[in-house]
Image (spheres, grey):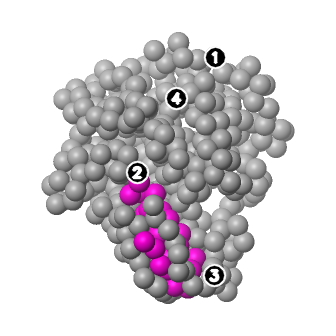
Amino acid sequence: MASTNGVNGGSTELNVSVNNANESDINSAPDRVKFAYWVPNVSGGLVISKIPQKTNWDLQSNIKYAQAAENGGFEYALSQIRFMAGYGAENQHESVSISQALALSTKKLNVIAALLPGPWTPAIAAKQIASIDQYTNGRISVNVVSGWFKQEFTSIGQWWLEHAERYRRSREFIECLKGIWTNDAFTYKGDFYQFNNYPLKPKPVSWPGRPYPEIFQGGNSHDARDNGAQVSSYYFMNGNTLEGFQSQIADVKERAAKAGRTDGPKFAVNGFVILRDTEEEAVRVLQEIQGKADKEAVEAFGGAVQQAGASTGNKTGMWANSKFEDLVQYNDGFKTKLIGTATQLVDRILLLKSLGISIVLCAFLHYDEDIEKFGKEIVPRVRELEAQGRGKDEDYEISLTGAVYAAKNQE
């Protein structure tokens, strides 16, 4: 069992004048639901489909998307981590460097850099992220992913650990990041990582309520839920049914309470957005995406990720219950039902908020157009209705739109 015995000193809060107005006027309410988007820093877009997509993976396109997202009220961007081609992602820009580039090309956007324990060590990650946090005045976060792509690990000479061990390593990785960032000298004796009076300088930027960069982590297994409950700032969820969301959120909260935690975690959910003038048009786009799925790539992806899910003790790992049509979007984003008219999407987002979800993570088919459209048609309407009290009464929101999330509608 890992420990942090022998740690000297406390948290160092930098005397940096942080303009924590990381919100435009539209994002001023403290209890608002926040919006994030997937950074398309790998080729092939966010669906494993041969449908034409107006989405590019190069840096200049991603800078354009980041600036459009920021102008439209998005507060976070999440980069992807891949070390090799597979399942439609033939080319991949590295996550930390592109996150830094996007943060330096924007003024308010918080960019979440994906980190993969194994290829990354906590020492390197802590140093990288602390420096970028200084460069951007506190606008970098991390998403610690435990990995699902066995060939990716073995191809670069990394040990492939089974599910529980991957999540146990991620747990130590997160504990080390937090310890390095908050202690003058950090000592740690774990099974995967060891430190002896390590003094990182400079530390990340800090202010009250934000002692270090936010740490995101996701998954559906009991191992993932424990990590989310005990050591993460945010717990990422795949798309699900209404009952699935409620059960998962309640379970993670219960695990956090048993661990004596009173500060979270908060919850974020993945969703694929298809915003059209009519529901029929949006559904036709979904059907075309799924109908033109890259069958070989989807089946290969499904085989890899469902092995990871099936290897968990409780058989509830990510993708363990996903069908072919679900796997066309990497994180079950179709299940989140952000597919329809502006009115429908707004109601569903407010329902998700009422369940306890703090961030809605969006993916799009046509990044060249869809981010800007979402910022114009969805974000202002959500803010308007939040100001009127919407998104707080779970029973009321379920009565309006909960039926679309019923299990029978996910079949």
Q: Earlier in the sequence, mark 4 or mark 1?
A: 4
Distance Cα–Cα, label 4 vs label 2: 22 Å
Three-letter amino acid code of the residue under disc 2: Tyr
- Farthest-out residue, top: 408
Label located before the other in sequence (3 or 2): 3
Earlier residue among tags 3 and 1: 3
Secondary element type, mark 3: loop
Question: Residue 386: image x %, image y %?
Answer: 77, 41
Q: What is the C-alpha distance between the residues marked 4 and 3? A: 40 Å
Depth check, front residue: 342 or 10: 10
In the image, taking residue 26 as reference, residue 362 lies left or right, namely left
Q: Position of residue 73 (x, y in %)?
A: 62, 53
Q: For the point 37% across and 64% down, which residue is it?
A: 191
**Alpha carbon separation for disc pair 4 and 1:** 13 Å
Q: Which residue is mark 4?
A: 240
Mark 3 highlights which residue? 10
Q: Residues within 10 Å of mark 1 (few under 14, many from 20)?
A: few
- Report x, y in % for residue 67: 51, 60
Q: Which residue is mark 1?
A: 403
Disc nearer the start of the sequence (1/2): 2
Alpha-carbon neighbours of circle 3 within 10 Å: few (<14), some, or many (≥20)? few
